[in-house]
Amino acid sequence: MLDALAVAAVADPLVLDAAEAHVQGPGWYPCWLRFAIALVRAESARVDLRSGLAVEALGLLTGDLRPFAGKPRACDLYAIHPLIEETVRRAVVHVSDEDWSQAWETLTHVSRGISTTLRGELGGPLPADLLLSIAVEQATPARRASVDEAIHSEFEQQAGGRYYSDLARYLLTRAWLALAAGKPAGAEARWLEACRFLGPV
């Protein structure tokens, strides 16, 4: 779908307008479709414009954050989770350090809005652990401190109601970030913390 839209963005931009006009209805799914169209526009724009356009595209994901509204509902999008993840990754690649804070705030807001919890297990198209892994992948030197703080903050907020395996995943994500920053001692410390959640050390 996205490849076809990308070709259309170059060959005939009016095709994107027509596609967008057909996206209607309540719920988060139409918001994601609008975002996907805007993402293709951003990717076909001049390089110096892509960060701002990518941030604007991400903003479209906030249009309706009711996880049980619409058809399909946000909580029922299992089959396209990989595609949703791909589009978010593609958008984040274009975000500059200057725009990172705004983009991250938007993604966090979306994740918390459309995620659902069943017996302590977090689900939805954009769960927090997925966003944090994306943030680590895109953590430039200028972003590392804020990304580490975001992981720590999420860990603290979720500590009382999540499975130990989920909490260990947050710690392992921080270890991954420490390794990327060239801090093996910090990575080892986080790894040992994660092991304590997974079993006796």
Image (tube, rainbow, N blue to C red):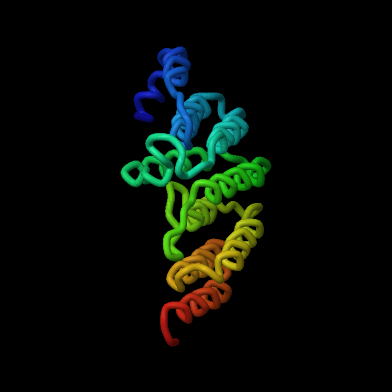
Which residue does the image show at 42% across and 13% down from the upper left?
Answer: 12
In the rendered image, the quadrant that contains the N terminus is top left
Which residue does the image show at 34% across and 46% down from the upper left?
Answer: 78
Displayed quadrant of residue 178: bottom right
Instruction: Return the residue found at the far right.
Output: 98
Q: Is residue 80 visible?
A: yes
Displayed quadrant of residue 199: bottom left
Q: Is residue 121 above or below residue 130?
A: below
Q: Nearer the viewer, residue 101 or 184?
A: 101
Q: Position of residue 106 (x, y in %)?
A: 60, 43
Q: Nearer the viewer, residue 45 or 26?
A: 26
Q: Position of residue 123 (x, y in %)?
A: 43, 54
Q: Position of residue 91 (x, y in %)?
A: 51, 38
Which residue does the image show at 53% across and 41% down from the upper left?
Answer: 65
Q: Position of residue 11 (x, y in %)?
A: 41, 14
In the rendered image, the quadrant that contains the C terminus is bottom left
Q: Is residue 160 above or below residue 154?
A: below
